[in-house]
Image (cartoon, helix red, strand yellow):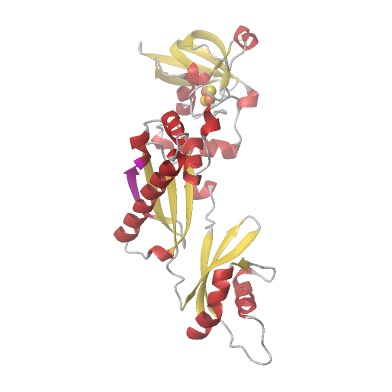
């Protein structure tokens, strides 16, 4: 047992055994004790505060802990290394809510065994950004002479309820007269719903409602991953991963920001990340034999610098004070 240490958490009196040298935040995750920590243990957010009551440990100096905190034995769990048995008090203000705990379990560092514990759908109920509806519109007559767009919205209410109101853009509106009459009034509409906004983004002839896909993109500094999702049921059909082409202009986010500050730098980095994502989407569509036009929405996530570069927003001020 010498290479292991016992940590006793108060006031819940829970004991967790970990290898000496483990940081306290990891030990807490192992013991299913979840506290606030928004920087994933990098010592930056200053939120993973705990009070050490007694025992052997070492901790790094950090600006996130005041002199007064230190006097009261309050330290950052992620910066505290366990050297022997210790007793730790969990501070009530750092405890997570039930929902936050579920999310934390999913994203706990390297703790894969937690993944099986919480079904994703329990945390994020299935609610696709865009949905397709096959509509058989009634034919216009002298008695029923509403506009083409109104005719579509009226039919959509059968699916979405009487209060459903939506909009569309001018190019779609311009295509409607010929498209409706050329398809014998049988069409598929793609509706995007986000917050209070509902918009018909695509109208296509005949029934294409069984082919609706989305792409979820994780824009990492080194690699980019894109998953093709069937928006009828949320099934992940395939994931493709590639090196972020921006890497040739700097390994880390600081060098990318510096490069973005030069001449056409921002344009170049923006172009490269879009190119990487487009190639991934192209591969997904080819490997899964789906039409690119059936991908009706894309969601991207990434760190602050990556999202700035993707959206072509000047990231320069991210590394400057304040
Ligand atoms: S988790 Fe952010 S400082 Fe510890």
Q: Position of residue 50 (x, y in %)?
A: 57, 18
Q: Is residue 116 visible?
A: no
Q: Is residue 49 left or right of residue 294?
A: right
* Residue at 49 percent of width and 21 percent of height: 78
* Residue at 41 percent of width and 18 percent of height: 22
Q: Position of residue 289 (x, y in %)?
A: 32, 64
Q: Is residue 60 visible?
A: yes
Q: Nearer the viewer, residue 252 or 285?
A: 252
Q: Is residue 244 above or below residue 10?
A: below
Q: Nearer the viewer, residue 154 or 111?
A: 154
Decide whether residue 47 is among the magenta residues.
no
Q: Is residue 184 above or below residue 159?
A: below
* Residue at 53 percent of width and 57 percent of height: 129
Instruction: Place residue 211 in its image quadrant.
Output: bottom left
Q: Is residue 66 above or below residue 276?
A: above
**Quadrant including the C terminus:** top right
Q: Is residue 83 above or below residue 167?
A: above
Q: Position of residue 272 (x, y in %)?
A: 38, 45
Numbered range of the magenta stretch: 237-245
Dominant SS in magenta: strand
- The residue sitting at the left extreme is 287
Q: Is residue 3 left or right of residue 7?
A: left
């Amino acid at each position: 047992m010498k290479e292991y240490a016992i940590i006793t958490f108060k006031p819940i009196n829970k004991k967790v055994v970990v290898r000496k040298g483990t940081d306290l935040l990891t030990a807490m995750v192992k013991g299913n004790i979840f506290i606030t920590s928004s920087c994933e243990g990098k010592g930056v957010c200053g939120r993973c505060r705990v009070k050490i009551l007694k025992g052997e440990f070492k901790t790094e100096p950090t600006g996130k802990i005041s002199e007064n905190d230190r006097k009261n034995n309050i330290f950052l769990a992620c910066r505290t290394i366990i050297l022997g048995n210790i007793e730790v008090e969990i501070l009530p203000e750092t405890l997570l809510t039930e929902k936050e705990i579920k999310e934390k379990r999913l994203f706990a560092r390297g703790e894969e065994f937690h993944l099986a514990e919480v079904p994703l759908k329990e945390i994020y109920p299935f609610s696709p950004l865009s949905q397709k509806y096959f509509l058989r519109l009634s034919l216009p007559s002298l008695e029923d002479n509403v506009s083409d767009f109104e005719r579509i919205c009226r039919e959509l209410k059968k699916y979405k309820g009487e209060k459903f109101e939506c909009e569309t853009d001018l190019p779609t509106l311009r295509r409607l007269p010929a498209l409706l009459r050329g398809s014998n009034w049988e069409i598929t509409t793609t509706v995007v719903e986000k917050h209070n906004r509902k918009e018909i983004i695509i109208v296509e002839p005949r029934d294409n409602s069984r082919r609706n896909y989305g792409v979820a993109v994780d824009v990492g500094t080194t690699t980019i991953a894109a998953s093709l999702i069937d928006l009828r049921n949320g099934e992940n059909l395939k994931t493709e991963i590639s090196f972020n082409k921006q890497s040739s202009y700097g390994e880390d986010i600081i060098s990318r920001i510096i490069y973005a500050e030069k001449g056409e730098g921002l344009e170049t980095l923006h172009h490269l990340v879009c190119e990487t994502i487009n190639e991934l989407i192209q591969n997904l569509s080819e490997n899964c034999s789906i039409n690119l036009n059936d991908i009706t929405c894309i969601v991207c996530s990434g760190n602050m610098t990556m999202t700035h570069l993707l959206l072509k927003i000047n990231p320069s001020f991210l590394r400057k004070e304040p």
